[in-house]
Amino acid sequence: MSVFLGVDGGGTKTALCLVNREGRILARARAPGCYYFAGGMELVERVLRQGVDEVCRQAGIAPAEIVYAFFGLPGYGEVSGDVPALDAAPGGVLGHGRYACDNDMVCGWAGSLGGADGINVVSGTGSITYGEHAGRGVRVGGWGELFGDEGSAYWISIRGLRAFSQMSDGRLPVGPLHEMLRERLGLAGDLDLVDVVLNRWRGERSKIADFGPTVVEAASSGDTCAAEIVTGAAWELAHMVDAARRRLGFGEYETVPVSYSGGVFGAGPLLDAFGAELAALYGGYELREPLYEPVIGAAIYAAKLAEMPLDGGALRRLRSAQRGSPTD
């Protein structure tokens, strides 16, 4: 039986999944986050060992029986000198070298498009785009919140908070966003926003990013400023995709599948605006709903890297299993 392991690492959790050649999910497991910038390089092997041991125990197999594995690791490739150590970490866990490592953005692409050529854009707390074409992969974005992450929840939230401050002191007309943020934060006075964001939260990125959906909701409620922020986010994300298309060398009239992942796309207005911006940039974009979770995408990609790609029947079975339907 050919078994493939997918690992989708993250800052708060690491998801693992074992899939066989027929497209059946044999086991799933979850381990702590493996973001080594926060926990050190030794964290990676420790977390991977915990997760691999658990997923193999559930499936009743040994790591040596895994035909191929793909490990999507957060922060991979962002410090060149750390790549050899990250590449080596799974080998000690599996006891063999039949695996590959890359940034966890690859899991999002492989899941959204089923490992097929095309481009996936991620917009959650941060933003990043990854695509493949003819065996070549390209990353665009993902430069962090200080001078990047355009179109992300953090990017949207910062602009929403700025608009709130300008509405408060008369630089902008007061719109629904102003009252919605006051209610959301329970502010007794507008200037209490400074205390909440800077003093209590100390500018914590994830807490600030949580305001993204409120800004999108305000746009749907007729707030002109919030609507401009949403349109701007869609523009940024679409241009990331377009840069990836050009760098990947898609033909001038070639259809380019595009998908998406991350919580920002759960908001209908932003997804609609994103689709419109894409269409304005290139007529050949084909916007598709995501097919699989990133961890399942990692397993699909593992099979592809092993030159044993899952066939159409196996991929359909995986989709049914993901929905909780019978897998036969």
Image: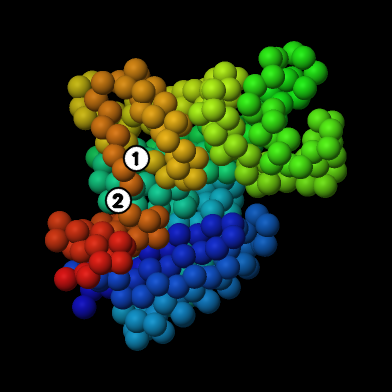
Q: Which residue is at the front of the view, 85 or 39?
A: 39
Q: Which residue is at the front of the view, 69 or 235?
A: 235
* Residue at 54%, 32% in the rendered image: 216
Whether residues under marks 2 and 1 lie with C-beta atoms below 8 angstroms apart, the answer is: yes
Q: Which residue is at the front of the view, 206 or 107?
A: 206
Residue type at tag 1: Ser
Q: Which mark is residue 259?
A: 1
Residue 260 appearing in the image: yes
- Answer left or right for 23 relative to 7: left
Looking at marks 2 and 1 on the same chain, the residue that comes earlier in the sequence is marked by 1
Image position, residue 104 (x, y; %): 47, 52
- Answer left or right for 164 relative to 220: right
**What is the spatial separation of the Cα atoms under label 2 and label 1, in whole angstroms?**
9 Å
Label 2 crowd bin: few (<14), some (14–19), many (20+), radius 10 Å: many
Image position, residue 52 (x, y; %): 45, 75
Q: Is residue 158 above or below residue 277?
A: below
Residue type at tag 2: Leu
- SS class of the residue under badge 2? loop
Image position, residue 68 (x, y; %): 32, 67
Q: Which mark is residue 291?
A: 2
- Residue 218 falls in which quadrant of the image? top right
- Answer left or right for 176 relative to 201: left
* Residue at 38%, 68% in the rendered image: 17
Q: How many marks?
A: 2
Q: Which residue is at the front of the view, 185 or 49?
A: 185
* Residue at 42%, 77% in the rendered image: 55
Q: Is residue 216 above or below residue 92?
A: above
